[in-house]
């Protein structure tokens, strides 16, 4: 049943074997219109029959979910200092998506676009290129942000949708909690505890465009040890007019060991091997060829849970990524039909050690968490950094967050991150907020914060050469001389969170974000003398942008069989747009809407219908306008349950009305569908 699915909330580590601790527990005149919209929304919510809403059977629903990723403190959504969206397991299943980035379409203000069938770009408020360098992504607290070019290699993540319990999306700067690169937002993916997946689970998906996907998971227990092994494979043909097929193999293993009543140790490892098809729709010299990736990780975590909410943990993780990208160009007439060998191989490694201490709640209502971390990044690439020697960057961090309940109705939130890195230098990222509980279940949220984004290694150390002595080619494509400063954002937020009984929650906000020193490629004289035959491109701090907007999120559960998740975002960007061939002002649609409706029928049948609308904008920041798009997805499932087997057969059809989404990249999205069969025993 839908209500039962809702109660399957995310566990975190507990102090008893097998026990699951539940954590679901410059303003311009046009802003006046946004403020009016927000006030109207508040009035509509307030005008609902609250007494009638509260008559719903309490057994169906839990309390307001607890958020872990906003401040590093476990807080109710009424207490968090910044707007946060939760995509729970029920929404993940009902969406019918098979790719992790697509789930973020359910978040107001988040844009999801495909450069190719295997290169997905995800951005909050603005999306000006495929690298999406301005949003942090965590998997169980492990940053998967690329130190080489920034962004996230979504296809190469060693994690599958089936292993995800929920996703928390912090919709605004969050450097006070997670440092630079949590610039416009943070996506925190939380996977399932090993104790949740005992037995064997199998899922098979097959459908349009060569989609073939298999997933097998086995979980078991030995005394105080819970463990899980997962193997997955996915392949598809990509988009019809592109050479962008992919084949992805994933292996993960996790063990959670309850050492004693207070201590838990977790070991998590994973591997992803990917083979992908490459083309270039803009450069006729680039052939169609195959490219391979390997990514792996290992994460160790020790956690001690004491009385009165005190908790200590230490984690160490390693991320490794190899991109094997060598090929021959197509024959070049000007060189007698010769083919130029291109080697764009990249290796990157990240080592991170972090300590965190959550103090017990004090008598005066103060909650405090503090900690620190050390990170070492190493990137090796001959072409992009101009040397066989790796580019390296060390980062030290100290952080603290506090929530002080000054009274029953007033809560002060504060956070501060000190960060020092070889590339970005030293910086402070503060956040200050006030939550005013105007009445039970109704909270006004005020917040201001500052965050930075340190340059990637390519932006700060770039020396991108194409050097072929046999043909007299010695071209410097992009250059830099360690003169790029971190990007900066200052953000202000006025939010309102309301809970009407256990049937309706509403979260709305207006915000203003001022972005400065945005990094781009400048055309002009080099900042230093360098002897090259061509190229006048170098990285520099060029642009500024102001983003203003309104966001609304509703979660409505009229009864145990139905649920509706709705999001709306209005975004307005005013930018200088000086970067070559990039347009910040048009990189986000004015209007962005999602609706996911879920219903349980009789006899184990369930269904969902989703609608996604994206207003016109300039795809990935280029200068070509993309028309507004709208798509409808449908999922219908039948549960098959016996005494020993719990299974489900589902049909998913995406873009039901075949609304073609034409793009400059020829990544045309048309109607497609797949069948999914899941069995657990």
Image: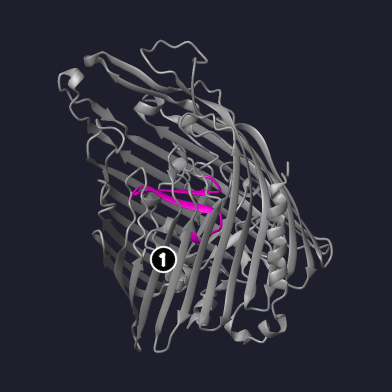
Looking at the picture, how far across and down is residue 600, in whole percent? 45, 82
Q: Is residue 314 above or below residue 646?
A: above
Q: x, y (%) of residue 624?
A: 43, 40
The one nearer the camera, 268 or 108, is: 108
| Residue 194 at x, y percent in the picture | 45, 68
In the picture, measured across the screen, residue 478 lies left or right of residue 234, that is right
The residue labelled by disc 1 is: 632
- Judge from the rendering whether residue 18 lies leftward or rightward of residue 496; answer left or right: left
The C terminus: image quadrant = bottom left
Residue closest to the eye, 500 or 308: 500
Does the magenta portion include 505?
Answer: no
Residue toward you, 15 or 625:
625
| Residue 432 visible in rendering | yes
- When asked about the image quadrant of residue 336, the answer is top left
Residue at 64% x, 58% y is 83
Question: How is the structure coloured here?
Answer: one colour
Of helix, strand and loop, which one carries label 1?
strand
Residue at the image point whose x is 55% and y is 54% from the top: 591
**What is the x, y in percent for residue 516?**
63, 34
> What residue appears at the point 72 percent right and 46 percent down from the top-left corner?
29
**Residue 79 in sight in this render:** no
| Magenta span | 105-126
Near mark 1 (Cα within 10 A), the count class, few <14, some 14-19 or many ≥20, is many
Q: Is residue 135 left or right of residue 238?
A: right
Image position of 530 with respect to 650: above or below: above
């Amino acid at each position: 049943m839908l209500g039962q699915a809702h109660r399957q909330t995310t566990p975190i580590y507990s102090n008893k074997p097998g026990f699951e601790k539940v954590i679901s527990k410059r303003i311009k005149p046009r802003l006046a219109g946004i403020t009016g919209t927000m006030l109207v929304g508040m009035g509509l919510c307030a005008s609902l029959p609250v007494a009638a809403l509260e008559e719903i059977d309490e057994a169906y629903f839990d309390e307001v979910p607890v958020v872990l990723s906003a401040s590093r403190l476990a807080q109710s959504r009424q207490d968090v200092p910044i707007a946060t969206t939760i995509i729970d397991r029920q929404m993940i299943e009902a969406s019918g998506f098979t790719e992790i980035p697509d789930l973020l379409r359910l978040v107001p203000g988040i844009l999801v676009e495909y450069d190719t069938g295997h290169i997905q770009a995800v951005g909050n408020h603005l999306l000006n290129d495929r690298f999406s360098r301005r949003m942090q992504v965590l998997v169980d607290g492990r940053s998967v942000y690329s130190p080489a070019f920034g962004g996230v290699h979504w296809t190469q993540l060693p994690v599958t949708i089936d292993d995800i319990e929920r996703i928390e999306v912090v919709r605004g700067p969050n450097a006070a909690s997670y440092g630079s690169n949590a610039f416009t937002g943070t996506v925190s993916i939380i996977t399932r505890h090993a104790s949740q997946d005992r037995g064997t689970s199998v899922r098979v998906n097959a459908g349009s465009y060569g989609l073939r996907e298999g997933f097998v998971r086995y979980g078991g227990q030995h005394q105080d040890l819970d463990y899980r092994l997962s193997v997955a494979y996915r392949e598809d043909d990509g988009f019809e007019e592109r050479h962008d097929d992919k084949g992805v193999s994933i292996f993960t293993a996790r063990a959670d060991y309850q050492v004693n009543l207070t201590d838990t140790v977790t070991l998590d490892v994973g591997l992803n091997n990917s083979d992908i098809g490459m083309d270039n729709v803009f450069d006729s010299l680039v052939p169609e060829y195959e490219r391979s990736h390997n990514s792996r990780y290992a994460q160790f975590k020790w956690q001690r849970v004491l009385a009165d909410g005190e908790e200590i943990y230490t984690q160490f993780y390693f991320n490794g990524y190899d991109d094997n990208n060598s090929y021959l160009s197509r024959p070049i007439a000007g060189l007698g039909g010769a083919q130029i060998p291109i080697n764009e191989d990249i290796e990157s490694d990240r080592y991170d050690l972090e300590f965190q201490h959550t103090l017990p709640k004090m008598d005066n209502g103060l909650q405090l968490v503090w900690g620190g971390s050390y990170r070492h990044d190493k990137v090796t690439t001959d072409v992009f950094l101009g040397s066989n020697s790796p580019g390296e960057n060390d980062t030290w961090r100290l952080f603290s967050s506090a929530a002080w309940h000054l009274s029953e109705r007033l809560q002060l939130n504060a956070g501060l991150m000190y960060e020092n890195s070889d590339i970005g230098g030293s910086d402070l990222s503060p956040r200050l907020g006030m939550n005013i509980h105007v009445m039970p279940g109704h909270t006004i949220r005020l917040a201001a914060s500052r965050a930075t984004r340190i340059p990637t290694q390519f932006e700060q150390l770039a020396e991108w050469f194409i050097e072929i002595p046999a043909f007299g080619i010695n071209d410097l494509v992009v250059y830099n001389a360690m003169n790029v400063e971190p990007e900066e954002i200052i953000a202000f937020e006025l939010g309102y969170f309301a809970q009407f009984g256990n049937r309706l929650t509403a979260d709305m906000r207006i915000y203003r974000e001022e972005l400065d020193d945005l990094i781009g490629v400048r055309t002009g004289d080099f900042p230093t003398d360098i002897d090259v035959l061509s190229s006048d491109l170098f990285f520099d701090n060029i642009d500024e942008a102001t983003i203003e907007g309104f966001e609304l999120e509703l979660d409505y559960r009229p009864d145990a069989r139905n649920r509706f998740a709705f999001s709306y975002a209005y975004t307005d960007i005013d930018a200088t747009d000086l970067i070559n061939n990039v347009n910040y002002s048009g990189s986000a649609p004015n209007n962005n809407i999602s609706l996911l409706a879920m219903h349980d029928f009789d006899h184990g049948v369930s269904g969902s219908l989703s609608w996604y609308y994206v207003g016109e904008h300039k795809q990935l920041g280029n200068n070509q306008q993309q028309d507004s798009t709208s798509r409808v997805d449908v999922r219908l499932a039948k549960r098959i349950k016996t005494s020993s087997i719990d299974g489900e057969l589902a049909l998913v059809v995406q873009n039901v009305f075949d609304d073609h989404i034409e793009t400059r990249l020829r990544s045309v999205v048309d109607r497609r569908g797949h069948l999914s069969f899941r069995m657990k025993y």
